[in-house]
Image: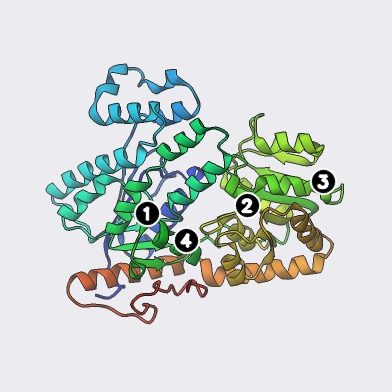
Amino acid sequence: MSASRPLRICFVAYRGNMRSGGQGVYLWFLARELAKLGHRVDVFVGPPYPDPMPFANSVQKLPNQQFWGGWFAQDRAAMLPQPSPLRALAPLNFYELAASWWGFLPEPFAFSVRALRRMAAQLRAGDRWDIVHDVQCLGWGLLGLRALSLPLVTTIHHPLSVDRRASFLRDESFRDALGTMTFYPIGMQAFMARRAERLFTSSSVSARHIHRDFGVPRQRIEMVANGVDTDLFHPDPERPRSPDEILCVGRASDPNKGIKTLVEALPQLPPSVRLTLVDDDHPDNAALHHARALGCADRLQIVGRVRVEELIGLYRRAALVVVPSRYEGFGLPAVEAMACGTPVVACAGGALPEVLATAGGGLLSPCDDPAALARAICELLEDPDRRRALGDAGRRGVEAAYGWPRVAARTAEIYAELLDERRGRPAMSTTSARPGSFRASASSPTSTP
């Protein structure tokens, strides 16, 4: 089968909004680019829902009561459906309510069952798909797709086992640790990952963790880097840069993002340097508390979760972007910054060394070392010519390696290879890997672990 033949692709994603995390960005842009290539795209998605997707053949919104959000906000009253509390007695609603009440994450499983029901109904009505692409849901309900003989692939940006290890780091009591052990549906996701016919991920470090933690055979792991819209994220020569502003995009509540290390580096930078942080701007933000304790709160501005247009403006205005993460499965802020021609200082956590080596737009610093991070930031702040050179190189590197058209084309090739194999015609493209190794991606020259 040629990758150029139009395919009927069904995406399933339990959260679809771009501001909910990387899976929403991945869903929207990959679906758009596949549609541009002539493929038919249908989407089954849970709340918060994606921005309008006019390029899709259909978008099926599968609502839930979002009980987990009420539990997370410690608002028990919000955990009853309004205006009719009796709706909580519907089987899946009751499961989500009970699981949320006890601190479990119920969304992936409940969404997968709802998606299976809706998809089965459409199949009975005569609809058909060539392939189903799950975006990091991996719920038990998707097992039903095997009974329906639908090829299933999935994307895991990084396994939940990484998040669980980070959660253990911030736990302060046995009760907290017990909550961490029960919250993450790792057993379900690992089981489902082993049953997907292909598994997409975006870096060799993520591939190694998926193989080690989830037991996925290496030959089923496809490394196709995430993408960035280089038409949307691009430099603006007319926009002046602030020579003393550094920008960070990350959640201070997640220890993997390394925001604490960056705040500790801030007092070691020249007094004129200001840090802009894109994160929730509530008064209990951990970064703000930490900056106050260090006496540098007046040099920190937290701007909240901004819209894409505002984020692009922040990238274009900053002298450089800092990504202090202890772990990243890909590192989207680093790639977005480089697409805007902004140099990056990143900690050598997870996939960030791969990303910076591929794009060539920044410097690396050791993880969890505020002094080393401050030195790397100062090195670039004191050398505007080098900043410009790194910004130009990063833009070129991102266009070459991480543009969405390239990512979508390679994804479609893998769909076609899988469908050929199911028809008894094993396909080996120039980018297929030898048995026993991670399958290489044309968009990732650093794809061998």
What residue appears at the point 49 percent right and 30 percent down from the top-left corner? 175
Along the viewing direction, whichever of 9 and 152 lies nearer the viewer: 152
Amino acid carrying mark 2 in the image: Ile
Earlier-in-chain disc, 3 versus 2: 3
What residue appears at the point 25 percent right and 49 percent down from the top-left corner? 142
Residue at which label 4 appears = 206
Residue at which label 3 appears = 267
Q: CA distance from mark 2 to mark 4?
A: 27 Å
Q: CA distance from mark 3 to mark 2?
A: 27 Å
Residue at which label 2 appears = 312
Image mark for residue 55: 1
Colour pattern: rainbow
The label nearer to you, 3 versus 2, is 3
Total numbered labels placed on residues in the image:
4
Residue 154 versus residue 297 in the image, above or below: below
Amino acid carrying mark 1 in the image: Phe
Residue 397 versus residue 372 in the image, above or below: below
Earlier-in-chain disc, 2 versus 4: 4
Q: Which secondary structure, mark 2?
A: helix
Residue 244 image offset from top left, x and y in percent? 81, 52
Q: Which secondary structure, mark 1?
A: loop
Q: Where on the picture, by quarter, is residue 81? A: top left
Residue 344 versus residue 48 in the image, above or below: below
What residue appears at the point 34 percent right and 47 percent down from the top-left corner? 187
